[in-house]
Image (tube, rainbow, N blue to C red):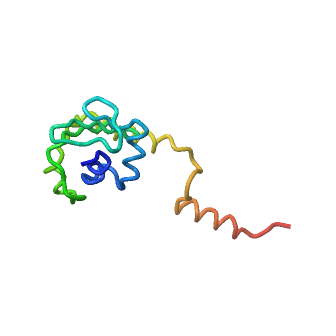
Amino acid sequence: MRLDQWLWAIRVYKSRSLAVTAIRSGHVRVNDAPAKPAHTVRPGDRIVVKTEVLVRTFRVLALPASRVGAPLVRDYAEELTPPEEYARAREAALLRAQFSSPGTGRPTKRDRRSMEAFRNLPESD
């Protein structure tokens, strides 16, 4: 089975084209070596996938015939990612939320109500 198919089948990426893009960008390594999308995956291979803030590690257990449901992923891949990696990703998400600049994005309900109140003020002559 191709590497891009396997990553898509076990739900690491939402589409094969996203998997291909990540592999070509060098974000996926097989047995500590860079890989190509057509690399043949075999049981026992160790695959490391780098995302924005998370480095996930898998061991190939089996090759699925097609995309599998989330509960069945554990039959085809063993997750070797350390818990510290997930904790670091959670911290990064909290920091991004904390340091977003005020006034960006959609106004809150409170902001919208204050804007409406400002618009409805009577004009002074």
The answer to whether residue 119 is left or right of residue 87 is right
Kindly indicate the quadrant of the structure image that contains residue 124: bottom right
Camera-side residue of 125 and 25: 25
The answer to whether residue 79 is left or right of residue 121 is left
Residue ID at (57%, 47%): 102
69 up-or-down from 2: above or below = below
Camera-side residue of 106 and 40: 40
The number of numbered discs placed on residues in the rendered structure image is: 0
Q: The C terminus lies in which quarter of the figure?
A: bottom right
The answer to whether residue 30 is left or right of residue 24 is left
Residue 37: % across, % down: 35, 44
Residue ID at (16%, 56%): 72
Residue 74: % across, % down: 15, 50
Camera-side residue of 68 and 88: 68
Kindly indicate the quadrant of the structure image that contains residue 14: bottom left
Camera-side residue of 3 and 70: 3
Residue situated furthest top in the rendering: 32
Residue ID at (28%, 53%): 11
Residue 59: % across, % down: 19, 39
The answer to whether residue 62 is left or right of residue 51 is left
